[in-house]
Amino acid sequence: MSLCARARPCVSRVCSAAVMFVKLLSVLLLFMIFYNEPAWAQKKKETLMSEKVTQMMEWASKRSVIRLNGDKFRRFVKAPPRNFSVIIMFTALQPQRQCAVCRQADEEFMVLANSWRYSSAFTNKVFFASVDFDEGSDVFQMLGMNSAPTFLHFPPKGKLRKSDTYELQVRGFAAEQLARWVADRTDVQIRVIRPPNYAGPLLLGFLLAVIGGLAYLRRHNLEFLFNRNVWAFSALCFVLIMISGQMWNHIRGPPYAHKNPNTGEISYIHGSSQAQFVAETHIILFFNAAVTMGMVLLCEAATSNLDTGKRKMMCVTGIGLLMLFFSWLLSIFRKKYQGYPYSFLMR
């Protein structure tokens, strides 16, 4: 046997050992890479989250309601990771949009955000922000929204639920109602603190001064205080105000009307039986007053001592007012309570 033949097994064993060493080294390197990757990814995630929170806190220190455009919304709200909730008002405040409701809702939203920002319980758990249509129309398109104002809660984790959309038409946009909704979604209790408003006390003081002045000027003739017509008219006005829904407006704070941003159509009557607009209250007040006037005219026509011609005119006018405005009231009722079967004169 030659020397080359005897050397071949040795070379083969060396090559096999080298191959095994390379495989073992490769497995070891892969193990180290996959073992360290979760820790590295977790550290990167924590760093990114810390940067987000720091930036949001910096913005919140300058302005209680953070203004977001499309890029900021995608980076700080839509993209993970995020360990804080964001309450966003989607609005259209530019003058050319002519959204009076948006301005009213913005004022209430600012009251709520300021109450949270300057409270002793303020943390980085909840932030308040706004997206204007003219600054973030792509966000409106992304979320499929076609109306403003709209309030949404973006939770730290998970997708949006139905309850994360604020029921504006039902609850109204008063800061107190928004605070209850925020507490329900985030477990953060916000005590709403409004800036002092002296208009109410001043108006009440002026009214009392006028009444006192009139009483003083007629201090020798106060028979008007015992006039049944004066007290009947005052009681009638109070009843009309109460049954038209003024107290509901005071408690819920609904918008005056609703304007569709796509069509520009303005709605004065709410389509649901669970809500109403302020304009709707005024319309109902006027219709009820007209029906009441018709009934008063009918009563006066039957009991007064006027000549026959005037009494007939009062009777016809009373019947006309009663039939026309009661028909309109019934028509509004049918619109709000879908399926109501009865109507009168008009649908």
Image (tube, rainbow, N blue to C red):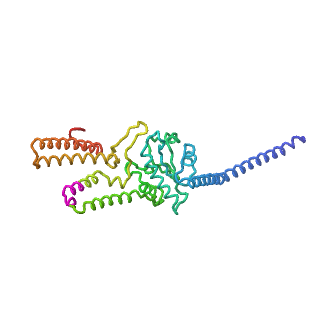
Towards the viewer: 183 or 39 = 183
Where is the C terminus found, in terms of image quarters?
top left
Measured from the top left, where is residue 237 in percent x and y? 25, 53
Rendered image quadrant of residue 238: bottom left
Measured from the top left, where is residue 11 in percent x and y? 84, 44
Towards the viewer: 270 or 308 = 308
Residue visible at 35% across and 58% down in the picture: 206
Q: Which residues are magenta?
A: 223-235
Measured from the top left, where is residue 109 in percent x and y? 46, 52
Left/right of residue 13 with respect to residue 209 in the rendered view = right
Rendered image quadrant of residue 84: bottom right
Q: Which residue, as the protein is rendered here, is positioned at the far top?
A: 263
Where is the N terminus found, in terms of image quarters?
top right
Measured from the top left, where is residue 344 in percent x and y? 20, 40
Residue visible at 27% across and 45% down in the picture: 333
Left/right of residue 212 with respect to residue 292 in the rendered view = right
Residue visible at 46% across and 61% down in the picture: 191
Residue 280 within the segment the image draws in magenta: no
Left/right of residue 202 with respect to residue 18 in the rendered view = left
Q: Main secondary structure of the magenta part?
A: helix
Towards the viewer: 213 or 94 = 213
Towards the viewer: 305 or 250 = 305
How many dots with numbers? 0
Left/right of residue 228 with respect to residue 109 in the rendered view = left
